[in-house]
Amino acid sequence: MKKRVLSILLCVAMTSALLAGCGGTGDGGREKGGDSGKEVETVNMTYFSFNNFDDTQMVEDAVNEITEEKIGVRVKLNAMEGGQYMAQQTMLLSGSEDIDLIVTPLVTDAMNSGAFADMSDLIEEYGQGIKEVLGDDIEAGRYHGCLYGLPNMHEYANTPMIVYNADVAAELGIDMSSVKTLEDMDSILAKVKEAYPNMSTPLYTSNSSGCLSATYYQWDTLGDNLGVLMFDNPDEIVNLYETDEYKDLVTTLHDFSNKGYLNVDAAVQSDNYWTLVEQNMSFACLINQHELIAQEYTPTTGVNLDYVPLGDTYKTTSKVTTFLWRIMSTSQKQEAAMKLLNLLYTDAEVEDLICNGIKDVHYTVGEDGKYTLPEGVDYANSTYYPNIDWVMPNGWLAGEWEDSIDNYGEKMTEYNDSAMVSPAYGFIFDSTDVANEVTACSNVVQQYCISVEENGEVDVDTALEELNQALKEAGIDTIIAEKQEQYDAFLEGK
Amino acid sequence: MVSNKKGYTIFLHTFMIILCILCLIPFILLIVVSLSSESSLLTEGYSFIPKEFSTAAYQYLFASPTIYRAYGYSLLVTAVGTLASVVITTLLAYPLAIRELPGRKFFNFAVFFTMLFSGGLVPSYMMWTQTFQIKNTVWAYIIPNLITNGFIVMIMRTYFETNIPKELLESGRIDGASEFKILLKVVLPISLPIIATIGLMSGMTYWNDWSNGLYYITDKKLYTVQVFLNNMLLNAQQLDKLSGSSLDMNALPSTAVRMAVAVAGALPLMCIYPFFQKYFIKGMTIGAVKG
Amino acid sequence: MKSVKRKTLAKQLKRFWPFYLMMLPGLVYLFINNYIPMTGLILAFEKYQVADGIYGSPKIGFSNFQFLFQTKDAWIITRNTLLYNLVFIILGNFMAIIVANFLNDVKRNVTKKIYQTIILLPYLVSIVVVAFLANAFLAGDTGFINNHILEPLGFESIQFYRETKYWPFILTFVYLWKTVGYSCIIYLASMSGIDPGLYEAAALDGAGRWQRFVKITIPSLKPTIITLFILAIGKIFYSDFGLFYQIPMQSGSLFPVTQTIDTYVFYGLTQNNNIGMSAAAGFYQSVVGFVLVLLSNIMVKRVSEENAMF
């Protein structure tokens, strides 16, 4: 009896009869999808939201009316809560789910395990709209020659900058336009500190979840800062923690820390800058962001924010591939999924429905054409306010809300186009062969970065030396050598 | 002797009261913070006397229609799950207490072994979702916790071993009663304490469980309170990591809300616990729990 | 001869089949829920491929295990995991017995109930929230200890989240605070099973309270203590992830004293979410735990046969 149960169960568990490899995947889906013309296929589309999406079913019905007519495909909107989505990601991508279309970060390991279908051929056939919208950036998700994902429309570049409270600056007579480097902030922060002695964090650097060098940088991090590319040395992968750039940065920050400009508890800071600046507990923030960020957060925080750039704007792989839309290799409806994806990149009506819900139910349109929540509804009790235009394939097509910036998409496109392109744009590092070293080095960086970068009590040189020593032992040189090799091959292929 | 006894009593109560205060202080802080306004928390820091009293956190929490349904599901899952769990555990533990049962040692070890080895999350997940399709059904809360752990089976078995007189079973058999009838009519009535104990332990597990919800439930309509609360905290953590992306701060629950969430999750159990306590202690006479 | 054997077997079956029937649901359940997923441990030796599934992916030997042993961190995380667990087992059980003994001596039922409910409170609060509470006490600038205790007394404030030396105590305290209320219940139950006549007889013989505790209570608790001890040994390579991840608020400076196997795996693998490597870590923890349980069981068997687990 038991043996029988075992064999049955094992069989079921093993029948994840799927297809591997780059080219084959697409074909497999297609054979099955050959008769898709006869019956309407339902594509499971999985994404996440951090806000409210209780009425997803209602929206789904409305979307299906359109998609069925336009492309003969139905969609199952599988919205998950953001935190849960991140926690489940490994399992969602392990091939055990009935998912056709999904949005994920870069996740090289899932790409290595063959979780995604190669879209190269599918896009030629069904994705002409996408090609038009994305242009050359369509290639950003190409990995080992396979097109495993498409970037969504968002900012593709960022600028090292200081975001600051313009009201406080005006009140203290500070001219922020004179700020060209981080060092220039010294006297300004001194002034702020003097005027507001209770301000806990005059200069906000980073929070508990990471190192400052992961959110503020003037180089191409190549994803993880373990081996980076300095823009003035486009051929060589260097060890960030041994560069003069890094040393200068942390020396300045140590100085700031000793003068009390940084939060003493930077390591465990759990509030973000926007919360702190709202309560006037912080003046400025050091970050890599797009140029509209200050304007975007002005209405949310109720504080008049502005920014000064500290360096050039660069387009990098990691920025473009923040979120990629994928077709799962296990999907039996890859053609239908591609058709749907094409519609999502190009059709304003569908995009608007998914991002904002149904007119006069979930929002009302003002005279200026901007959306507001209906009477008596707020963000907490709304039944559909998913706030996912930054996750969806092309959220710029969706309607704009009253607090948002006019013509956001156009402005962002302009910004993206104005950016310089990193020499490593399009390069995705495959860490399979150095996975052990990456694990060890990630731990080392996590351990040392806060004390190296933001703890004024320690001596910069000693701390840096310790960090580099530990990284050497953890095998950073092996990672860099491997990265260099892959990067050389990438440059050659370009 | 008398004064010695009095001295001991005073010492005992002093010790217990200090211990209780240690346990209560953070909890009081928790409640105070949940009733403080967000701005006062940021500017004044944490304090036992709220600088600005505010029920905004609870209003925010209970504005969401999800939480009411979630309380309903929590009750349902806890009730059904506990019942099923008690039945299946009792049925497994009772025969293991029969000393003459052939293969008893093997079965004992089979139960014990499950406490040491686990296959990890990914294989379990694949099996439950692919083979059994429990994703986004109520079963996802109930089934993975049916036998919470081997320990509970062993506690129960030991109770049966030590507390059920053999003669009682024998006389039942002589009367011609079936083994099932003996279990039902003879054994169970004198085993209420252990049943209540197992019930409470598994009830606590079901009420407090958020991990099954995290992995198997993505449909908001099926959330239990703990899953609702846990997802809220998880969202906050993830949002912190993504901060700076173009996202809305309205989604970020404030410190006060997070504390209110904790209170809302723990309160019902705290209210129920004293009523069950009587049985709980009695039943935990595990004596010699061994394999 | 053979037929006799068969006869007894048939006889036994006739007598015992109801018991096997009773056990069936539970055994089937354990088999499905616990034993089938164990076959998934094979992942630890594979380079997982979606197309090949759990059982068909290419085998790569032990290379998934390398990251656990490769660096000098391996020593630190193993040491931390073991030492904390040892301290937790010893102090945790010690505190639980003491508290249970006191509770057992409380005569009034209402008082007993109140005490018990209150000390169970911490067990009911999510560890994430406990981390916030701990932060409320420990934070450098706004924290309770610095703001309301050290500074008014004229001491210099302490940057808890940067100083490793306090954390072994903080973590142990938080652990005990959170778990003693629950674990003392088990001992309390065992104590209520002790025949009160034993105590009365001892009291008549003039044995003091302490003597009664040592001579009667502790020996009666011995089986429970040994069981809990062996079980804890089985889990000694696992650490309470929430405790070590949340309470130090992921402060890197504290890693030398807060990093355990579980947190190391977590931090390391958030970069590359490798199913094989996580499985390898789990496999390693299970196997070592299992071996240790076997060893400690042998030891227990030597000392007192009847208390061995199997």
Image (cartoon, rainbow, N blue to C red):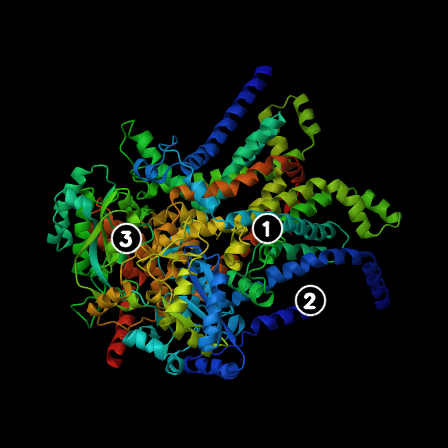
Of residues A286 and B63, the one nearer the viewer is B63
Q: Is residue A287 visible in this depiction of the protein?
A: yes
Image coords of residue A269 (percent x, y): 31, 46
Q: Quadrant location of residue A399?
A: bottom left
Of the numbered discs in the image, which one, if any, rests on residue A2?
2
Tag of residue A151: none
What amino acid does circle 3 point to? Tyr
Q: Would residue A350 appear left or right of C220 to someone viewing this image?
A: left
Circle 1 chain: C
* Percent position of residue C194, x then y: 67, 33
Residue for point 66% across, 25% down: C202
Measured in 3D between alpha carbons, the distance from the residue under mark 3 to the one under mark 1, in whole angstroms, is: 62 Å
User: Which element is circle 3 on?
Assistant: helix
One can see residue B291 in this view: no
Residue C214, by quadrant, is top right
Taking the view exactly as shown, the residue that stands out farthest to the front is A367
Nearer the camera: disc 3 or disc 1: 3
Q: Which residue is mark 3?
A: A297
Does residue A182 sit above or below B23 in this rendering?
below
Alpha carbon separation for disc pair 1 and 2: 30 Å
Q: Residues within 10 Å of mark 3 (few under 14, many from 20)?
A: many
Estimate the spatial distance between the alpha carbons at disc 2 and disc 3, rounded to whole Å: 61 Å
Give the residue pinned by disc 1: C297
Q: Amino acid at mark 1?
A: Asn
The amino acid at mark 2 is Lys
Q: Earlier in the sequence, mark 2 or mark 3?
A: 2
B71 or A382, which lies in front? A382
Q: Which quadrant does the N terminus of chain B fall into?
A: top right
Viewer-side label of 1, 2: 2
User: CB atoms at circles 2 and 3 under 8 Å apart?
Assistant: no
